[in-house]
Image (cartoon, rainbow, N blue to C red):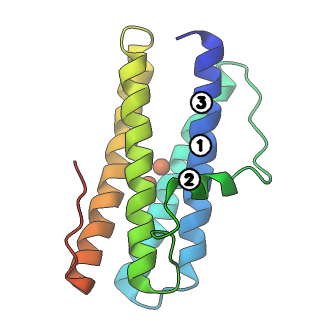
Amino acid sequence: MTPEELALQLKEFYLLEQYQVSYYEDQLSALTDAHLRYAHEQMVERERQHVRFFEEKFAQRHLETPAIAGDLTRFAGFVSAKALNLASLEGRLRTGVAIEAKASAMYRELITHLAGYDDKLAEQLWHNLIDEEFHMCWLASKLESISGERVETNV
Ligand SMILES: [Fe+2]
Ligand SMILES: [Fe+2]
């Protein structure tokens, strides 16, 4: 991996994390159940920490923080049209699981590519990966308890 390739990756992950913040913020207005609301507030907070993590990486590397305007919607492509169903609570939870599954897969891939190149960064990214897996498992468990639907998380 070259420094330029890593800079591109950092930008991609920064946008991924901004997307997660905005996605969970959007869900808050639709949630009435206290348990679900607190969980989503907690996820928004954690995704904001991830955003700040990448902002620090840009600052340390003297890279410009990317502009995010208009660039987040493409991340909705993470989830299939079938999964992106926000009309029901089950649909929202299923969408959240799909987003977190994709985020986890992206983190795993980057961590693998960083081995031997930047082990310190890889170690830090493990914490973000685990956060995303926690989100995925919580959402999958909630979906399962509401719908009885068996949800594969592959953790
Ligand atoms: Fe995140
Ligand atoms: Fe997440």
1 and 3 marks in contact (CB < 8 Å): no
Q: Is residue 152 left or right of residue 32?
A: left
User: Mark 1 — residue?
Assistant: 52
Q: CA distance from mark 1 to mark 2?
A: 6 Å
User: Mark 2 — residue?
Assistant: 48
Q: Is mark 3 within 8 Å of ligand 1?
A: no
- Image height of 12 relative to 17, above or below: above
What residue lies at 65% left-to-right and 33% top-to-bottom?
Answer: 11
- Image height of 130 relative to 95, above or below: above
Disc number lying in front (3 or 2) = 3
1 and 2 marks in contact (CB < 8 Å): yes
Q: CA distance from mark 1 to mark 3?
A: 12 Å
In the rendered structure, which amino acid carries the disc numbered 3? Leu
Disc number lying in front (1 or 3) = 3
What residue lies at 46% left-to-right and 55% top-to-bottom?
Answer: 46
The residue closer to the viewer here, 62 or 24, is: 24
Q: Which mark is residue 10?
A: 3
In the rendered structure, which amino acid carries the disc numbered 2? Arg
> What crowding class fits label 2: few (fewer than 14 Cα within 10 Å), some (14-19), or many (20 or more)?
some
Query: Can the viewer see residue 57 in this picture?
Result: no
Q: Is mark 1 within 8 Å of ligand 1?
A: no
Q: Secondary structure at mark 2?
A: helix
Q: Earlier in the sequence, mark 1 or mark 3?
A: 3
Q: Quadrant of residue 14?
A: top right
Residue 32, image x and y in percent?
A: 46, 91
- Image height of 78 relative to 2, above or below: below
